[in-house]
Image: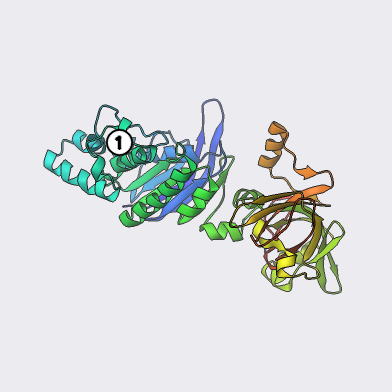
Amino acid sequence: MAAIAIEHLGKTYADGTRAVTDLNLDIMDGEFLVLVGPSGCGKTTALRMIAGLEEISEGTIRIGDREVNNVPARDRDVAMVFQSYALYPHLTVHENIGFGLTLRKMKKPDIDKRVREVAEILELTDHLDRKPRQLSGGQRQRVAMGRAIVREPQAFLMDEPLSNLDAKLRVQMRAQIARIQRDLGVTTTYVTHDQTEAMTLGDRVAVMRGGLLQQVGPPQTLYEQPANLFVAGFIGSPGMNLISTTLTVDGGKTTFGIGDTTLEVPESVLHQRPALRNYAGKQVAVGIRPEDMEDAEIVGDEPGATLTSVADLVEAMGSDVMVHFPVQAEAVLTEEQKQLVDETGAAVAGTSGTVLVGRFSPRTRVYVGQPIKVRIDTARLHFFDLQTGKSVWD
């Protein structure tokens, strides 16, 4: 096992395309770090540079105590698991897992012992004599992982290994990967575009956009304290509701309006975000997580924390109910959301205003077209500078 240190890493292709810019990451020994971001953000390029499959334009990569900038991929002592299983169809599971050891000319009894140990970890013992075509997608992915584990590398590098699996199998495999990594304690860097996958797997999550690192930290920190509008909109499912409004300070109270409703910013939020007082009379972006809104019929009405609207769409999910409702406010769109709107023509606002999404309790009895009161947990509001996109804190 070994730590991975990435310093000022950059990648520019021959045509001038800038894929990664000044990436700095310290991946601790035994840590599970997830690189996440939309397609084209540079996460896979960064992983391939660590593996030695992409040439570095600038910067330094260290694996353990060794700088590996000029070390060939085969000599970096890392194992990579790809999106495609890349199994040899004519070999058995046993032969696929042990293939790398065979190339090293290890003795057959030693190979067999090591393969069976790995197969037990991956619950593949009963399938060692089968060919890949006789396996399910999840089993094939476990064989691909076994081929990496059996080498006992200093680090695992995984490039969207679950993207070919169906939704249910992905959930199962996520749990298995987390368990295996925890049991082995091997430093792991995992790439995905699925933020749910990132949040459930990573000890820390690094969010990338346009080749730049946006924020890195424990999953809950990214969720509760997003550094900017992009991270706020990207992390969370559904994403954070973001609207533009003006802060007003009057008589010691700090408020903002959404349509005809005035909402009050609690003192606890002002204490956490002292710089917010500098935005009096200015426009800011306010972020509200769907789960921080609830049907006021259930939790009670509270002046300064309740919106009125009409239910536009109700989605019963079993454990909760997603309620879409319009408000008179201007939506704040991230660049990715704007691009999606341009490409698909997707609607971001109803005829009567911006549509917000609230995650209500399954006890709610809200129906489409019904006037509703929405209670907001104002202690959990988020605020962002509209010019820089950065979260307002100190």
221 left or right, relative to 275:
left
Picture residue at 34% right of the left edge, 37% below the top: 140
Q: Position of residue 102 (x, y in %)?
A: 19, 35
Observer-nearest of 391 and 340: 340
Picture residue at 22% right of the left edge, 36% below the top: 129
Observer-nearest of 93 and 274: 93
Q: Quadrant of residue 184?
A: bottom left
Is 239 situated above or below 128?
below
237 left or right, relative to 271:
left
271 left or right, relative to 214:
right
Q: Residues within 10 Å of mark 1 (few under 14, many from 20)?
A: few
Query: Which residue has dot 1 on it?
Result: 74
* Kind of element beneath mark 1: helix
Q: Position of residue 94 (x, y in %)?
A: 22, 38
Observer-nearest of 307 and 152: 307
Observer-nearest of 279 and 239: 239
- Quadrant where the C terminus lies? bottom right
Query: What amino acid is found at the position of numbered circle 1 in the picture?
Result: Arg
Is 236 situated above or below 79?
below
Q: Is residue 386 visible?
A: no
Picture residue at 73% right of the left edge, 33% below the top: 345
Q: Position of residue 166 (x, y in %)?
A: 47, 40
Q: Position of residue 69 (x, y in %)?
A: 38, 39
Q: Is residue 315 visible?
A: yes
How is the structure coloured here?
rainbow
138 left or right, relative to 106:
right
Picture residue at 36% right of the left edge, 56% below the top: 182
